[in-house]
Amino acid sequence: MNLITFYYTQPLSGTSHSPNALDRASLFPLYFLMDEKTKENLKELYEHGRELYEKGKYAEAEWMLKEVIMIRPDYADVLNKLGVIANLDGRCEDAVNYLTRALKLNPQYTEASLNLAVTYNEMGEFDKAQDVFVKASQIAASSPMRIDPFVAGKLANEHFRLGNTYCDFFLYDEAIEEYRKALKLRPTLADVHTKLGIALRSKELYDEAVEHFTKAKEANPYYWPARVQLGLTYYMKGLSGLAFEEWEDALKQNPDLSEAKSFLHLLKKDE
């Protein structure tokens, strides 16, 4: 029997019963009464549970993490992991409980916010999901350098997806706003720069569009849609020479670029 199990099964002071789920929260102060050896054992239990979680062995990880959280209910990371495990197991209400507790401990825990938004979405609670996502985005966008790159990428992808939806319905102002939010989180996404350029061009903001197609080209010289769209924007500005140069240079690097071939053919025919 390990120390934590011992704590769970011993009667509470002045009682003759073992602690239930509510009683166990009162065990938290015991952590501060533990000697360093016992605290080290608790840390090892956490590390073991975390390793199992990262290997995808969620059932084994769950009971260890639950033992940790009973003694240290202030571990937001553990609560987040338990929330993910509950979600994957289809226990969405349990997931919401864990993730909400994690966010009460750390309102800027963006990963927990995203997991909570996903859980609400799976429950059909779309308004709650959107509210949580918006708050997470605001926190991340206000301090992008402080958040985990994986989380920043995840948020940027959501803004990109939403921007594309707005574009599909010709809502270019809203699309531009979402693309800019994505780029604030991840400034070197060539596909986002390209879609932002297309939205700007649709509003006849050609110079800004050229700027973003150029940034896309700089971020990834082999992202061919940016090269094609940059040439097209030059053409729409009346800069046929620059359009020709852009498409011809792209074709030299990628002879199978059919769109560039077509535009060059039309340009030559137009001349």
Image (cartoon, rainbow, N blue to C red):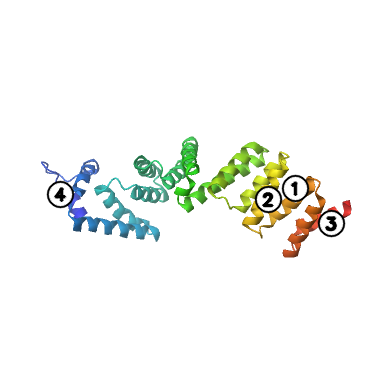
Marks 4/3 in contact by CB < 8 Å: the verdict is no
Identified at 66% across, 55% down, the residue is 217
Badge 3: how crowded within 10 Å, few (<14), some, or many (20+)?
A: few
Q: Disc 2 marks which amino acid?
A: Phe
Q: Is residue 50 above or below residue 79?
A: below
Q: Point out which mark residue 10 bears.
A: 4
- Do residues under tags 1 and 2 come within 8 Å of each other at their CB atoms? yes
**x and y, in percent, of residue 59 in the image:** 35, 56
Element type where label 1 sits in the image: helix
Q: Quadrant of the N terminus?
A: bottom left
Q: Which residue is mark 2?
A: 213
Label located before the other in sequence (1 or 2): 2
Q: Are marks 4 and 2 in contact (CB under 8 Å)?
A: no
Distance between the alpha carbons at the discs numbered 3 and 1: 16 Å
Return the x and y of residue 50 as percentages of the image width and height: 35, 57
Instruction: Give the alpha-carbon distance from disc 4 to disc 2, as whole Å.
Output: 67 Å
Of the residues tagged 4 and 1, which is closer to the observer?
1
- CA distance for labels 4 and 1: 74 Å
Query: Can you say whether 236 is above or below 55 in the image?
Result: above
Q: Which residue is mark 3?
A: 265
Earlier in the chain: of badge 3 and badge 1, it is 1
Residue closest to the eye, 137 or 234: 234
The residue singled out by tag 1 in the image is 233
Distance between mark 3 and mark 2 Cα atoms: 22 Å
Does dot 2 land on a helix, a strand or a loop? Answer: helix
As shown in the figure, which amino acid type bears the numbered disc 1?
Thr
* Disc 2: CA contacts within 10 A as few (<14), some (14-19) or many (>=20): many
Q: Is any atom of residue 1 visible in this view?
A: no
Kind of element beneath mark 3: helix
Label 4 SS: loop
Q: Is residue 72 visible?
A: yes
